[in-house]
Amino acid sequence: MTAPDFWQLMGFGARGWGRAMLAGALMTLAVAACGLLMGAVIGVIVALAKIGGGAVARALADAYTTILRGIPDLLVIYLFYFGGSSILTPIGHLFGASGFISLPGFLAGSLAIGVVCGAYHAEVFRGAFRAVSRGEIEAALAVGMPPWLRFRRIIAPLALRYALPGLGNVWQIVLKESALVSVTGVVELLREAQIGAGSTRQPFDFFIAAAALYLAITSLSGVALERVERRLSRGMRRA
Amino acid sequence: MLARIVAAAALAALVAVSGGAQSKEWTHVNLGSEGAFPPWNMIGPDGQLAGYEIDLAHDLCRRAKLDCGIGAGEWTSLIPSLNAGKFDMVLGLGINEARKKVVDFTIPYASGAATFSVLKGGPVPQFPLTGERLNLNDKTKADPVMAQIRQILKGKTIGVVQSSSHEQLVHAYFGDDVTVRTYKSSPERDLDLRAGRIDASFDSAVYMNSILDKAENQDLAVTGPLLKGAMLATEVAIGMRKNEPELKAIFDKAIQEATEDGTIRKLSLKWTKVDLSPSSGN
């Protein structure tokens, strides 16, 4: 591998892979962002169930986090993608459809990632909700805030402040997890690198380019996260 | 009463589903390919599939007057995708007993061989019978040679692609005498061979020949006999789900024609520099 060859290979010319690799990076971001958002919604619900739910809700929430954090992510993706279509196809046939019916790879992949990272989200949010001091909630109760207003104005902003570093970790996990989604046929960054490495037999160039793109994404999101963290802790005393 | 109606409806649906599978009229076929195994199949920077198998698949579909879509998927996800129904056929499957239990095959459209590569001047000396065809089913001739290679490889590490028939062969013929390391793809394995992390590799002869002209592979040497037979999947065919006799008949006929009129010879020489015609006998 020499430098001019590398830039030609990763360039934007007719034989250059630059555009394909960037498209792969965008796909990685899209899958990861969708997964993260879905996971956040699941995470808040499960965290609330763990804290304030009845015995059944708590048991269900505990089972969910234990199972999803305890099995390999690839397995979950397989279950959603291949399992999903083996359930959907016969159902579709009953209603007169023919052929193969599946969740689109992107949907199955980001759903699987969402379900897995929801378990991590739940633990992060649970800790954050617990960290909101009792006094703040009592003050909200004292001025007569109804539950939803209390959650929106007091608990959520305070909890988010505590949750943010943990959410940053979850985001990094999700980004790397998104590389597994390629089994569904989604061409994200790592799969694009593998295609390029296989088709041109230049594995080093492609894996180095992929590593650089992953690092660019993670370090940029690190900077963004720090900004948000500073903004959310405006009212806090700095040690 | 209700239960009986539901049961009857379910039974009718079941009959309809299985009946549909039995006498299927094929007009559109989804083919799957790895898309990263040149010269058999590869993907360009524009995302287009190319290679020997891609050209041949288009030719076969034209002969069979079928509308074919060819998609790419990771090697390890191809057979699950086939069974789930995403693909109807998978290109580039070597025929062997283990796979016959899972999928059905067309007649072969390429007849290759498998051989070894080592680092020039590395810890493993050259093997006997380099470049000569050897059929493992001819036991009286093949077994002494394989025993000799086993002796040479004793205590060494050999790299193969995971879930390949090459992996099955090294386990069966070299057993506990060698350490087997598996890789997701051949180029990844070659990186380790060049780095000296493994002592030898075992792969298809077409692949081995296709990498030797690359500058970074000048330290590699192809050695040992060109093997076929036993569990080796040197006969390459199209794999399909079990019990699709119509589809098999269509493609068997098309492959037969392409073999006889020289299309396979022409295409394989163009892409692999080797005549892979199934009838070449060796």
Image (spheres, coloured by chain):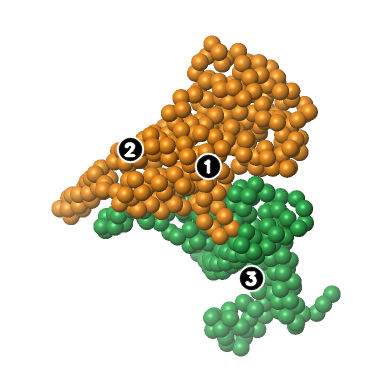
Chain colours: A green, B orange
Q: Determine whether the residue tagged by mark 1 lies in a helix, strand or loop.
A: helix
> Farthest residue toward the top?
B140
> Farthest residue toward the bottom?
A143
Instruction: Give the quadrant of residue A103.
Output: bottom left
Q: Residue at x 75, y 30 (%)?
A: B120
Give residue A202's position: percent from left, percent from top. Answer: 68, 49
Give above or below for B170 relative to A60.
above
Query: Residue A129 bears which disc, if any?
Result: 3
Q: Is residue B38 left or right of residue B201?
A: left
Which is more foreground, mark 2 or mark 1? 1
Q: Amino acid at mark 1?
A: Lys
Q: Amino acid at mark 3?
A: Phe
Give residue B124's position: percent from left, percent from top. Answer: 74, 25
Front residue of this view, candidates A24 and B68: B68
Q: Is residue B267 left or right of residue A167?
A: left
Q: Residues within 10 Å of mark 3 (few under 14, many from 20)?
A: many
Give residue B156's position: percent from left, percent from top. Answer: 72, 26
**How many angstroms separate mark 1 from mark 3 (CA)?**
66 Å
Query: Residue A15 bears which disc, if any?
Result: none
Q: Determine whether the residue tagged by mark 3 lies in a helix, strand or loop.
A: helix
Instruction: Give the quadrant of residue B45.
Output: bottom right
Residue highlighted by disc 2: B253
Residue A49 seen anywhere in this rendered image of the structure: no
Q: Amino acid at mark 2?
A: Lys
The reply to whether discs 2 and 1 touch (Cβ–Cβ < 8 Å) is no
Front residue of this view, candidates B235 and B6: B235
Residue highlighted by disc 1: B270
- Given the image, what chain letter belongs to the residue carrying mark 1? B
Give residue B95's position: percent from left, percent from top. Answer: 46, 32
